[in-house]
């Protein structure tokens, strides 16, 4: 398994920090007794942000796999990549 490149790692950390902030915001909303519609809206935003982060990482992983497979003259380990895609799917 290849290591995440530095620029991808920084982008992922940025995305995860935003999601973490959203989670804290939802916790505050619950503590404050805010309406269900507001809370559900924020949870949906968190879900979209999480899905976007997963797809970003999958795209990077796919690119890395293709480059590595090409450089080694090996066949693409497509089954492993497909398994990852299904794990990331809602």
Image: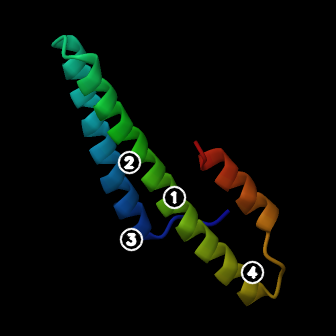
Circle on res. 69: 4
Circle on res. 7: 3
The x, y position of residue 48, in whole percent, is 41, 46
Which of marks 4 and 1 precedes in the sequence?
1
Disc 4 vs disc 2: which is toward the camera?
2
Which of marks 3 and 2 precedes in the sequence?
3
Would you place residue 66 above or below residue 39 in this image?
below
Q: State yes or no: discs 1 and 3 in contact (Cβ < 8 Å).
A: no
Q: State yes or no: discs 2 and 1 in contact (Cβ < 8 Å).
A: no
Residue appearing at x 51%, y 58% in the figure: 55
Q: Residues within 10 Å of mark 3 (few under 14, many from 20)?
A: few
Which of marks 3 and 1 precedes in the sequence?
3
Question: Could you say whether the residue bearing mark 3 is in a helix, strand or loop?
Answer: helix
Would you place residue 27 above or below residue 67 in this image?
above
Image quarter of the N terminus = bottom right
Separation of disc 1 and disc 4 at Cα? 21 Å
Q: Is residue 33 left or right of residue 89?
A: left
In the picture as drawn, the residue positioned furthest to the left comes out as 32
Which of marks 1 and 2 precedes in the sequence?
2
The image quadrant that residue 72 belongs to is bottom right
Marker count (numbered): 4
The residue singled out by tag 1 in the image is 55
Would you place residue 13 above or below residue 19 in this image?
below
Which of marks 4 and 3 precedes in the sequence?
3
The x, y position of residue 71, in whole percent, is 72, 88
Separation of disc 2 and disc 1 at Cα? 10 Å
Circle on res. 49: 2
Question: Could you say whether the residue bearing mark 4 is in a helix, strand or loop?
Answer: helix
Residue appearing at x 24%, y 26% in the figure: 38
Disc 2 vs disc 3: which is toward the camera?
2
Separation of disc 1 and disc 3 at Cα? 16 Å
């Amino acid at each position: 398994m290849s290591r995440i490149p530095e620029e991808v790692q920084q982008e992922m950390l940025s995305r995860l920090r935003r999601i973490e902030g959203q989670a804290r915001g939802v916790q505050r909303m619950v503590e404050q007794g805010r309406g269900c519609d507001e809370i559900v809206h924020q949870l949906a935003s968190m879900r979209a942000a999480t899905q976007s982060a997963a797809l970003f990482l999958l795209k990077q992983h796919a690119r890395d796999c293709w480059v590595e497979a090409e450089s080694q003259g090996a066949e693409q380990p497509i089954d492993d990549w497909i398994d990852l895609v299904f794990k990331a799917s809602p």
